[in-house]
Image (cartoon, rainbow, N blue to C red):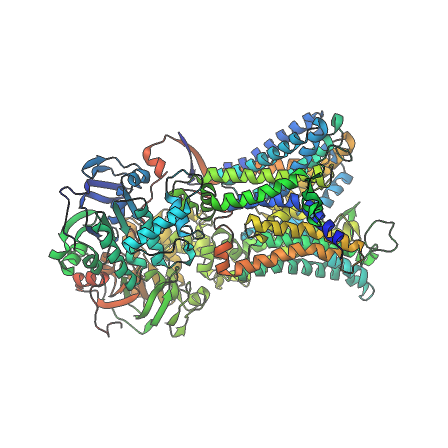
Amino acid sequence: MRIVFEKRQSVSRTIRVLVPVVSLVFALVFGAFLLILSGVNPFVAYAAMAEGAFGDVHALSETLVKAIPLMLTGLGVSIAFRMLFWNIGAEGQLAMGGLVATGVALYASNALPSWSVLPAAILLGMVAGALWAAIPAVLRAYLEVNETITTLMMNYIAILLVSHMYHGPWRDPGGYGFPGTARFPEVAWLPRLYDRAHAGLFFAIIAAAVLWFVLQRTKWGFELRIMGENPTAARYIGINIERQIIVAMLVSGGLAGLAGVCEVTGVMRRLQQGLTVGYGYTAIIVAWMSQLNPWGVLLVGFLLAGLLVGGDQIQMAMGLPAAMGLVLQGALLFPMLGGALFTEYKLRFVHASPEDAVLPRESLPKESES
Amino acid sequence: MNLSLISSILTITLRAGTSLLYATIGEIYAERSGILNLGVEGMMMMGAVSAFAVAYHTGSLALAVLTALLVGAVMALIHAFLSVSLRANQVVSGLTLTLFGTGLASFLGQRLGPDGSRLVGLVGPSLERLPIPVLSVLPIVGDSFFNQDVLTYGLYLCVPLAAWYLYKTRAGLYMRAVGENPQTADAMGIRVGWNRYLYTMLGGALAGLGGAHLSLAYTRGWTENITGGRGWIAVALVIFAMWDPLRAVIGAALFGGINAVQFRMQAAGTTIPAALLNMLPYIATIIVLVVITWWETLRKRVGAPAALGVPYAREEKG
Amino acid sequence: MNKERAEKPILRMEGITKRFPGVLANDNVGLELHQGEVLALLGENGAGKSTLMNVLNGLYRPDEGSIYVRGELTDIQSPRDAYDLGIGMVHQNFMLVETMTVAENVVLGLQDLSFQPELRQVKRRLEALGERYGLKVDPDAYIWQLSVGEEQRVEILKLLYRDADILILDEPTAVLTPQEVDDLVGVLRQVVNEGKAAIFITHKLREVMMFADRVTVLRDGKNVATRSTSETDPDELARLMVGREVLFRLDKTACKPGAPVLEIENLKALNDKGLPALRDVSLAVHAGEIVGIAGVAGNGQRELAEVITGLREAAAGDVHVNQRCITNCSPRRAIEAGVGHIPEDRVEMGLVGDMSVAENLALKAYRTSVLSQGPVLSLDGMKDFARDLIDGFDIVTPGPETRVKFLSGGNLQKTILARELTACEGLLVAVHPTRGLDVGATEAVRKQLLEERDRGTAVLLISEDLDELLEVSDRIAVMFEGEIVGVVPADDADVERIGLMMAGEHREEEGAAG
């Protein structure tokens, strides 16, 4: 008796929907298990989480604060993943965006007309993120260097750089012992909507719309999708692979950079610890779980942020660890990962036959054989 | 520079590098068999927290170490199952394990103290330094090499053993074949899947062990983010070491020691910004990676295992 | 030549029949092999040679028939069983790990269970074997350092190391230089002189005469003849191998060739292993004509198509399409120059499986103003475009939005054809266009090619199916070992001569390259 994976002939819609749903159920069950271990009623806990994340406008605003950077970096990562470029560097690209925006806010506010400071910060921040992503992109496009490692290393360099700057050269002398820059002048503040939720939300929505349009309705988007679906065919059609990689990564890094800009100009309004808290890594999960669909990224980003904020809330209310959110996140992805296989393959139990022991399935003789 | 300075730098380097080196050796084995494990950071975290918790509650350091090994192996089992049997995307799977492991470790760190309180701030049994008689009084090397804790001593055995196993035994030969050319290995009757499971779990166990060293010997106790990215450095170190256990020593010493040197230099009042020193390992890794990839003959001789990260499926021959 | 033979053949295969879905690969085939002899297994593509040997090697199980080794009936169920019987095969794709040494690779294949491989012992034995059989290889060399010929030596040594008595070699000379071929002859002689026996699969007549004592000819899955090489000649073998009498002809209008569209001059190129694949190819294809490239697979046809379509670098020489030089330009330039390409790998290269039929049909045309305005695609335009093509080319699909991977093989090819015929302006390169298709789809494709030619397009048709080439082409160019050894008109073609050219036995005079 053997287990054989057989490629499916057709991918049913039910499977596609079933997999994420089952993942969710699994995650909730696993989380409930952990909660029970902590002596808490899971239903109560989950209700409290939902309340804490979405219960009132204030809760919603806090959820949005976490959601916006997830959405933006998620969108960026999803573009890269579309062409099978494993951009693990969103965290660093975000950091660089925040760093450069800080530089503009602190040092260019006087030199520029007041209406242009914020746009300049946004633009330059995005450029910074884009360029930070371009380096691994070039290495991969022209030298075929593995991008997983290079983007990861760039993260550390960026994080260290940011930390260095607000501990050192850009440190606010008037600060109360907490390392960080001075507060930005108001001209460099990203307007807020309610409490700490800021206009970055619009950026995220617009970015998703643009991305969706580009992917579905433009030549470039078409080419990007082809590159990810079948790289051999992409070459055959005459797509300039190197250029595509670099352009897509500029976009990817730019979006992550934008997330960084929003964090420093909208939420913190200074550069300090709390910029690089893992959005770039969580973005990977967001992108994967939303199957790289821009609207999905918004939704999943929002829900995941809710998970994190809800986790914060019940920590305080019930003395539960905040890490709960993180744990659930991980618990969600495993079944999704494993489940992804089931959209492609069927599980079959085969009675072993001698032939199967050698070749599970015989193949037609190939080209040069007879 | 006087001798005691060199000695103290060496000492700190060895202590700091131990956890890194364990994790790196483990990842070398996993990758040599063809599985990319990006979950090392999470496994180290879990190893750290579980080792400390067990040590605190049972007082047995041996049990603590064993737990760390087990925890790491179990986490790696998940990754192996996803990667080998379900042929999932190894990058995403590993990353998830890290996020999950980090989160879970943090959760446990809040919960595994006495009566469900926090572990943070508690003081538990730790691995003391055990000077080896005679050898520990040697100038310079005596205090640094022969006055360490048992896990560091373990490396003196582990590393040569790892190299020997890899290059000199039949099993090591089979493992390398599995990572380079699973089709050929399969045709030769070598069990690809089984090998990959085994070495991935070994890698996880060693990562867990590295984490244990942190909470039992180096930092002593549990704090949030006790690993500080060491797991990721280990992944980079594997490339730096070009998948060779002996070269990994140089890498771990280098990367681990930079912290020690930097601390010393700051104390001595240097002008090189700490951040720049800390960046060096990562910049170096990128450069090494570029050089390796670019230089094709080098790639064939000491490059990544050819089948690294690619799920193997027998039906889809070639 | 060694004429000594044991009383009983060391190997006897009787009545081997093997079916695959839609194909009868081996039809009641028998074969005998004696100790001390080299037997050649000769045939075209599809004749059943590799299948038969894979049955012997334990990779396939025959539907009918029996195998006797050393007089005893055997039941070979796996390569392991074949191994135990002393049967070993050197495949075309070597089973070697590049980053390991020769000795380590040999160790990999052994069933020994010792903890530490006795490499010194292995090396010594390898050196001794190398001496004995003229297979000198440095046991400490890494595989990546070796030439392809040396790699093959390692594969043979692996078999000899474990005392295989019956050696099977699959197209062994495909990857060798002439000098290495001579060396291999010597090696095989030496090996069989010691009481072993060898079978080698080939399509090259010259080598049959060089290497073998006897030859068994397969055609269409049947054993058509067995001869002693001393009692036959290449002509007879060619006739047996190709053996055609009747040819079908489609209604073809007379060919009215126009100006040359594709001009290839002195083209040289390497294959993926770094060996020369094209060794000075010159050819012209005119508007309104179909030039077929005949030849057994592996003689440079694939590389020729790739160079023309921009997917492979040319080491030397020129390719001009419509007077535009596209040598070593990107695939994009080739497409812009008007080259249409029906690729050999339908699914891997020519289509994006998870995209819709409409999207696949638009893969070349999406850049034009028909399907896009500026950077934006016109989805309606794409749909209309798709509908036109689906109707025009009779593509059977639930709809233009269906994922193309759900279409049948014939419809996949129709999709590609529809796209390429619409997109190409002047030159169409079709590589094995009817491979794997049923009769109906095959006829449809051939008709399309003829229609395209009537419209004035130049068509370069590469095919393993000689029937198809004779039916469809106006001229046939035969490729052998990276060169065009002759170009003949397809009407009233002397099939025997073509067979000889395909097998390397004959060259046409210069001036025929058009």
Instruction: Give left or right: position of A301 versus C358.
Output: right
Instruction: Give left or right: position of B200 versus A33.
Output: left
Q: Residue at x 54, y 40 (%)?
A: B200
Does residue A332 appear anywhere in the picture? yes
Q: Is residue C33 above or below residue C151?
A: above
Q: In x, y percent, where is residue A287? A: 60, 46
Instruction: Give left or right: position of A45 versus C354.
Output: right
Furthest toward the front, the residue is B134
C34 vs B170, nearest the viewer: B170
Q: Residue at x 76, y 37 (%)?
A: A56
Q: In x, y percent, where is residue B284? A: 63, 57
Q: In x, y percent, where is residue A126? A: 68, 58
Q: In x, y percent, where is residue A99? A: 74, 57
Does residue A144 appear anywhere in the picture? no
A88 vs A248, nearest the viewer: A88
A104 vs C111, nearest the viewer: C111
Q: Is residue A225 above or below residue B109?
A: below
